[in-house]
Image: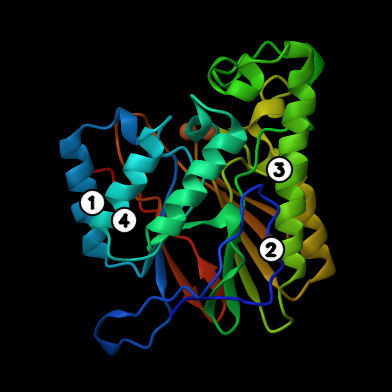
Amino acid sequence: MLRRIESAEPTKTDASTETGTTAIEKRGGDTSRPKLAWITDPHFDHAKLETWRLWADELIAYSPDALVVTGDLSEGDDVAYQLRCMADTFDRPIYFVLGNHDFYGKSINETRRQIIDLTREVEHLHYLTDSAPISIADDAVLLGDDGWGDATVGDYANTTVRLHDFELINDFRDSPSETWQATLQREGRDSGDRLSIKLQSLPTTIKHALIATHVPPFRESCWYEGRTTDENWAPFFVCGGVGAALRKAAQANPHRMYTVLCGHTHHDGDAEILPNLIVHTGYSRYGTLDIESIIELTDDGFHVPRTFASST
Ligand SMILES: [Fe+2]
Ligand SMILES: [Fe+2]
Protein backbone atom coordinates (compact mmCIF):
# COMPACT_ATOMS: atom_id res chain seq x y z
CA MET A 1 0.00 0.00 0.00
CA LEU A 2 1.28 3.47 -0.84
CA ARG A 3 0.47 6.33 1.47
CA ARG A 4 1.57 9.90 1.82
CA ILE A 5 4.08 10.80 4.55
CA GLU A 6 2.21 13.44 6.50
CA SER A 7 5.22 14.94 8.26
CA ALA A 8 6.75 16.41 5.11
CA GLU A 9 6.80 20.17 4.64
CA PRO A 10 4.55 21.67 1.98
CA THR A 11 6.13 22.44 -1.37
CA LYS A 12 6.70 25.95 -2.69
CA THR A 13 4.73 25.93 -5.91
CA ASP A 14 2.57 29.01 -6.25
CA ALA A 15 -0.61 26.98 -6.03
CA SER A 16 -1.69 25.19 -2.88
CA THR A 17 -0.18 21.79 -2.14
CA GLU A 18 -1.99 18.49 -2.11
CA THR A 19 -3.49 17.28 1.11
CA GLY A 20 -4.97 14.01 2.25
CA THR A 21 -3.80 10.43 2.01
CA THR A 22 -2.97 8.51 -1.12
CA ALA A 23 -3.28 4.76 -1.04
CA ILE A 24 -3.46 1.85 -3.43
CA GLU A 25 -4.54 -1.65 -2.69
CA LYS A 26 -2.53 -4.52 -4.10
CA ARG A 27 -4.47 -7.05 -6.11
CA GLY A 28 -5.88 -10.18 -4.52
CA GLY A 29 -4.70 -9.45 -0.97
CA ASP A 30 -1.07 -9.58 -2.14
CA THR A 31 1.18 -8.46 0.73
CA SER A 32 4.43 -8.11 -1.24
CA ARG A 33 6.06 -4.74 -1.76
CA PRO A 34 4.63 -2.65 -4.59
CA LYS A 35 6.21 -2.68 -8.04
CA LEU A 36 6.33 0.49 -10.08
CA ALA A 37 6.31 0.91 -13.86
CA TRP A 38 8.69 3.67 -14.97
CA ILE A 39 7.92 5.62 -18.13
CA THR A 40 9.96 8.56 -19.40
CA ASP A 41 9.60 11.05 -22.23
CA PRO A 42 6.63 9.34 -23.88
CA HIS A 43 5.90 12.43 -26.03
CA PHE A 44 2.40 11.09 -26.58
CA ASP A 45 1.71 13.76 -29.22
CA HIS A 46 4.09 11.91 -31.54
CA ALA A 47 2.53 8.46 -31.03
CA LYS A 48 -0.27 6.96 -33.11
CA LEU A 49 -3.40 5.76 -31.34
CA GLU A 50 -2.64 2.12 -32.18
CA THR A 51 0.84 2.50 -30.65
CA TRP A 52 -0.76 3.94 -27.52
CA ARG A 53 -3.21 1.02 -27.26
CA LEU A 54 -0.49 -1.62 -27.65
CA TRP A 55 1.66 0.16 -25.09
CA ALA A 56 -1.25 0.38 -22.64
CA ASP A 57 -2.01 -3.34 -23.05
CA GLU A 58 1.63 -4.18 -22.41
CA LEU A 59 1.71 -1.98 -19.35
CA ILE A 60 -1.47 -3.49 -17.92
CA ALA A 61 -0.03 -6.98 -18.50
CA TYR A 62 2.86 -6.15 -16.17
CA SER A 63 0.26 -5.36 -13.49
CA PRO A 64 2.24 -2.62 -11.75
CA ASP A 65 0.86 -1.13 -8.55
CA ALA A 66 1.63 2.40 -9.71
CA LEU A 67 3.16 4.31 -12.62
CA VAL A 68 6.02 6.79 -12.39
CA VAL A 69 6.43 9.17 -15.34
CA THR A 70 9.53 11.37 -15.52
CA GLY A 71 8.26 14.12 -17.80
CA ASP A 72 7.79 15.20 -21.41
CA LEU A 73 4.36 13.63 -21.66
CA SER A 74 3.29 15.92 -24.49
CA GLU A 75 2.95 19.64 -25.25
CA GLY A 76 0.44 22.38 -24.36
CA ASP A 77 -3.14 21.40 -23.51
CA ASP A 78 -2.48 17.84 -24.69
CA VAL A 79 -0.52 17.19 -21.46
CA ALA A 80 -3.69 17.38 -19.36
CA TYR A 81 -5.62 15.35 -21.96
CA GLN A 82 -2.99 12.60 -21.95
CA LEU A 83 -2.91 12.49 -18.16
CA ARG A 84 -6.70 12.08 -18.12
CA CYS A 85 -6.40 9.26 -20.68
CA MET A 86 -3.83 7.53 -18.52
CA ALA A 87 -5.96 7.91 -15.40
CA ASP A 88 -8.98 6.52 -17.27
CA THR A 89 -6.98 3.56 -18.56
CA PHE A 90 -4.83 2.57 -15.58
CA ASP A 91 -6.71 1.96 -12.37
CA ARG A 92 -3.60 2.74 -10.36
CA PRO A 93 -1.89 5.86 -8.96
CA ILE A 94 0.10 7.77 -11.56
CA TYR A 95 3.01 9.73 -10.10
CA PHE A 96 4.61 12.18 -12.50
CA VAL A 97 6.81 15.21 -12.96
CA LEU A 98 6.72 17.56 -15.93
CA GLY A 99 9.44 18.03 -18.55
CA ASN A 100 10.28 21.12 -20.59
CA HIS A 101 8.00 20.08 -23.49
CA ASP A 102 5.04 19.93 -21.11
CA PHE A 103 5.34 23.70 -20.62
CA TYR A 104 5.10 24.58 -24.34
CA GLY A 105 2.39 27.09 -25.19
CA LYS A 106 2.09 28.61 -21.71
CA SER A 107 4.16 30.08 -18.92
CA ILE A 108 5.82 27.77 -16.41
CA ASN A 109 3.52 28.87 -13.57
CA GLU A 110 0.40 28.67 -15.75
CA THR A 111 1.20 25.08 -16.71
CA ARG A 112 1.88 24.05 -13.13
CA ARG A 113 -1.38 25.66 -11.95
CA GLN A 114 -3.37 23.85 -14.65
CA ILE A 115 -1.82 20.49 -13.83
CA ILE A 116 -2.22 20.98 -10.08
CA ASP A 117 -5.91 21.77 -10.64
CA LEU A 118 -6.20 18.59 -12.67
CA THR A 119 -4.68 16.49 -9.90
CA ARG A 120 -7.23 17.91 -7.46
CA GLU A 121 -9.96 16.71 -9.77
CA VAL A 122 -8.64 13.30 -10.87
CA GLU A 123 -8.00 10.94 -8.00
CA HIS A 124 -5.23 8.81 -9.52
CA LEU A 125 -3.04 11.69 -10.69
CA HIS A 126 -0.23 12.89 -8.41
CA TYR A 127 2.13 15.64 -9.50
CA LEU A 128 5.28 14.92 -7.47
CA THR A 129 6.53 18.52 -7.73
CA ASP A 130 3.43 19.46 -5.76
CA SER A 131 3.42 16.45 -3.46
CA ALA A 132 5.01 15.47 -0.18
CA PRO A 133 6.99 12.20 -0.21
CA ILE A 134 4.87 9.13 -0.83
CA SER A 135 5.43 6.14 1.43
CA ILE A 136 5.97 2.95 -0.55
CA ALA A 137 6.88 0.75 2.40
CA ASP A 138 7.87 1.22 6.02
CA ASP A 139 11.43 1.98 4.92
CA ALA A 140 10.95 3.45 1.42
CA VAL A 141 9.52 6.59 -0.19
CA LEU A 142 8.92 8.11 -3.61
CA LEU A 143 9.38 11.84 -4.15
CA GLY A 144 10.27 14.16 -6.99
CA ASP A 145 10.46 17.50 -8.73
CA ASP A 146 10.48 18.61 -12.37
CA GLY A 147 14.04 19.93 -12.51
CA TRP A 148 15.26 22.15 -15.34
CA GLY A 149 18.37 22.45 -17.51
CA ASP A 150 19.57 25.30 -15.32
CA ALA A 151 22.64 26.75 -17.03
CA THR A 152 24.85 25.94 -14.05
CA VAL A 153 26.93 23.24 -15.74
CA GLY A 154 28.75 23.60 -19.06
CA ASP A 155 29.58 26.72 -21.08
CA TYR A 156 26.42 28.81 -21.31
CA ALA A 157 28.27 31.93 -22.50
CA ASN A 158 29.52 30.20 -25.65
CA THR A 159 26.88 27.59 -26.34
CA THR A 160 25.45 27.33 -29.84
CA VAL A 161 22.36 25.43 -28.63
CA ARG A 162 18.97 27.14 -29.01
CA LEU A 163 16.19 24.95 -27.67
CA HIS A 164 12.58 25.26 -28.87
CA ASP A 165 11.88 26.07 -25.21
CA PHE A 166 12.94 29.66 -25.88
CA GLU A 167 10.27 30.12 -28.55
CA LEU A 168 7.51 28.00 -27.06
CA ILE A 169 7.55 28.73 -23.31
CA ASN A 170 6.18 32.17 -22.50
CA ASP A 171 8.74 32.93 -19.79
CA PHE A 172 11.44 32.92 -22.47
CA ARG A 173 9.50 33.97 -25.56
CA ASP A 174 8.25 37.17 -23.90
CA SER A 175 11.60 38.18 -22.43
CA PRO A 176 14.91 39.30 -23.97
CA SER A 177 17.49 36.57 -24.40
CA GLU A 178 19.79 38.30 -21.89
CA THR A 179 17.35 37.27 -19.14
CA TRP A 180 17.14 33.59 -20.09
CA GLN A 181 20.13 32.39 -18.11
CA ALA A 182 18.75 33.91 -14.90
CA THR A 183 15.37 32.26 -15.55
CA LEU A 184 16.99 28.88 -16.13
CA GLN A 185 19.04 29.25 -12.97
CA ARG A 186 15.97 30.28 -10.98
CA GLU A 187 14.05 27.22 -12.12
CA GLY A 188 16.91 24.90 -11.18
CA ARG A 189 17.38 26.58 -7.82
CA ASP A 190 13.64 26.40 -7.04
CA SER A 191 13.56 22.71 -7.97
CA GLY A 192 16.56 22.02 -5.75
CA ASP A 193 15.02 23.97 -2.86
CA ARG A 194 11.68 22.15 -3.10
CA LEU A 195 13.45 18.81 -3.26
CA SER A 196 15.71 19.66 -0.31
CA ILE A 197 12.68 20.37 1.90
CA LYS A 198 11.23 16.96 1.05
CA LEU A 199 14.56 15.14 1.46
CA GLN A 200 15.19 16.76 4.83
CA SER A 201 11.70 15.80 6.02
CA LEU A 202 12.35 12.06 5.74
CA PRO A 203 12.36 10.20 9.04
CA THR A 204 15.43 8.14 9.94
CA THR A 205 13.44 4.95 9.39
CA ILE A 206 13.55 5.58 5.64
CA LYS A 207 16.37 3.54 4.11
CA HIS A 208 15.46 3.84 0.43
CA ALA A 209 14.41 7.00 -1.41
CA LEU A 210 13.28 6.89 -5.04
CA ILE A 211 13.48 10.32 -6.67
CA ALA A 212 11.77 11.16 -9.96
CA THR A 213 12.91 14.18 -11.97
CA HIS A 214 13.04 15.11 -15.64
CA VAL A 215 16.50 16.55 -16.23
CA PRO A 216 19.65 14.60 -15.34
CA PRO A 217 20.92 16.14 -12.10
CA PHE A 218 24.61 15.51 -12.79
CA ARG A 219 26.87 15.75 -15.83
CA GLU A 220 27.80 12.09 -15.21
CA SER A 221 24.14 11.09 -15.63
CA CYS A 222 23.57 13.13 -18.80
CA TRP A 223 23.96 10.41 -21.42
CA TYR A 224 24.01 10.76 -25.20
CA GLU A 225 24.96 7.80 -27.39
CA GLY A 226 26.88 6.14 -24.56
CA ARG A 227 28.84 9.26 -23.59
CA THR A 228 28.09 12.04 -21.18
CA THR A 229 27.32 15.57 -22.27
CA ASP A 230 29.77 18.15 -23.58
CA GLU A 231 30.10 21.81 -22.55
CA ASN A 232 27.82 22.99 -25.37
CA TRP A 233 24.75 20.97 -24.33
CA ALA A 234 25.28 20.66 -20.58
CA PRO A 235 23.67 24.03 -19.68
CA PHE A 236 20.31 22.72 -20.96
CA PHE A 237 20.63 19.04 -20.07
CA VAL A 238 21.85 19.06 -16.48
CA CYS A 239 19.97 20.41 -13.46
CA GLY A 240 22.72 21.50 -11.09
CA GLY A 241 20.21 22.69 -8.49
CA VAL A 242 18.66 19.24 -8.11
CA GLY A 243 22.09 17.64 -8.24
CA ALA A 244 23.34 19.75 -5.35
CA ALA A 245 20.26 18.91 -3.26
CA LEU A 246 20.70 15.19 -3.90
CA ARG A 247 24.43 15.17 -3.22
CA LYS A 248 23.97 17.06 0.05
CA ALA A 249 21.23 14.69 1.22
CA ALA A 250 23.18 11.58 0.25
CA GLN A 251 26.34 12.79 1.99
CA ALA A 252 24.39 13.67 5.15
CA ASN A 253 22.66 10.27 5.24
CA PRO A 254 25.19 7.63 4.21
CA HIS A 255 22.94 4.79 5.39
CA ARG A 256 20.07 5.80 3.14
CA MET A 257 20.11 4.79 -0.54
CA TYR A 258 19.04 7.44 -3.07
CA THR A 259 17.86 6.07 -6.42
CA VAL A 260 17.13 8.70 -9.05
CA LEU A 261 15.04 8.31 -12.23
CA CYS A 262 15.30 10.89 -15.01
CA GLY A 263 14.96 11.38 -18.76
CA HIS A 264 15.24 14.39 -21.09
CA THR A 265 18.28 13.24 -23.09
CA HIS A 266 16.37 10.27 -24.62
CA HIS A 267 19.55 8.22 -24.22
CA ASP A 268 19.85 5.73 -21.38
CA GLY A 269 22.60 5.08 -18.90
CA ASP A 270 23.34 4.60 -15.21
CA ALA A 271 25.70 6.67 -13.09
CA GLU A 272 26.94 6.04 -9.56
CA ILE A 273 27.57 9.49 -8.14
CA LEU A 274 28.20 8.29 -4.57
CA PRO A 275 28.03 4.80 -3.08
CA ASN A 276 24.49 5.64 -1.91
CA LEU A 277 23.42 7.82 -4.88
CA ILE A 278 22.72 6.28 -8.28
CA VAL A 279 21.01 7.91 -11.25
CA HIS A 280 19.14 6.00 -13.97
CA THR A 281 18.55 7.96 -17.16
CA GLY A 282 15.84 6.67 -19.48
CA TYR A 283 15.55 6.01 -23.20
CA SER A 284 13.00 7.49 -25.58
CA ARG A 285 12.34 7.78 -29.29
CA TYR A 286 9.65 9.98 -30.83
CA GLY A 287 6.71 7.96 -32.12
CA THR A 288 7.39 4.85 -30.05
CA LEU A 289 6.16 4.19 -26.53
CA ASP A 290 8.27 2.20 -24.11
CA ILE A 291 8.23 0.89 -20.59
CA GLU A 292 11.60 1.87 -19.21
CA SER A 293 11.53 -0.47 -16.22
CA ILE A 294 9.37 -2.42 -13.84
CA ILE A 295 10.94 -1.34 -10.59
CA GLU A 296 10.98 -3.78 -7.70
CA LEU A 297 11.63 -2.89 -4.10
CA THR A 298 13.50 -5.51 -2.05
CA ASP A 299 15.23 -5.32 1.31
CA ASP A 300 18.36 -4.20 -0.61
CA GLY A 301 16.55 -1.26 -2.19
CA PHE A 302 15.06 -0.35 -5.54
CA HIS A 303 16.00 -2.50 -8.52
CA VAL A 304 15.66 -0.83 -11.90
CA PRO A 305 16.09 -3.44 -14.64
CA ARG A 306 15.73 -2.02 -18.15
CA THR A 307 12.73 -3.31 -20.05
CA PHE A 308 12.97 -1.61 -23.44
CA ALA A 309 9.65 -3.14 -24.37
CA SER A 310 8.88 -1.00 -27.39
CA SER A 311 5.31 -1.54 -28.54
CA THR A 312 5.95 -0.56 -32.15
FE1 LIG B 1 11.90 14.41 -24.07
FE1 LIG C 1 12.89 17.14 -21.99
Q: Earlier in the sequence, mark 2 or mark 4?
A: 2
* Image position of 193 (left or right of 282): right
Q: Are dots 1 and 3 in contact, CB under 8 Å? A: no
Q: Earlier in the sequence, mark 1 or mark 2?
A: 2
Residue at which label 1 appears: 56
**Residue at x 39% of width, y 42% of height:** 80
Other residues around mark 1 within 10 Å, as few (<14) / some (14–19) / many (≥20): some
Can you see residue 180?
yes
Q: CA distance from mark 1 to mark 3?
A: 32 Å
| Nearest to viewer (mark 3 / mark 2) | 2
Task: From the top left corner, tell me how far across and down residue 152 is, in percent.
Answer: 79, 32
Location of residue 170 in the rendering, given as x and y in whole percent from the top left corner: 59, 22
Cβ–Cβ under 8 Å for marks 2 and 4: no
Q: Which residue matches tag 4? A: 87
Residue type pointed to by label 4:
Ala
Quarter the N terminus occupies? bottom left
For residue 10, side relative to residue 128 (left or right): right
Q: Are marks 4 and 1 in contact (CB under 8 Å)?
A: no
Q: For the residues marked 2 and 4, what is the alpha-carbon distance in whole angstroms?
A: 25 Å
Colouring used for the render: rainbow
Mark 3 or mark 2: whose residue is earlier in sequence: 2
Amino acid, disc 1: Ala
Q: Residue at x 25, y 55 (%)?
A: 88
Q: Nearer the viewer, mark 3 or mark 4?
A: 4
Depth check: 176 or 200 in front?
A: 176
Q: Which residue is mark 3?
A: 218
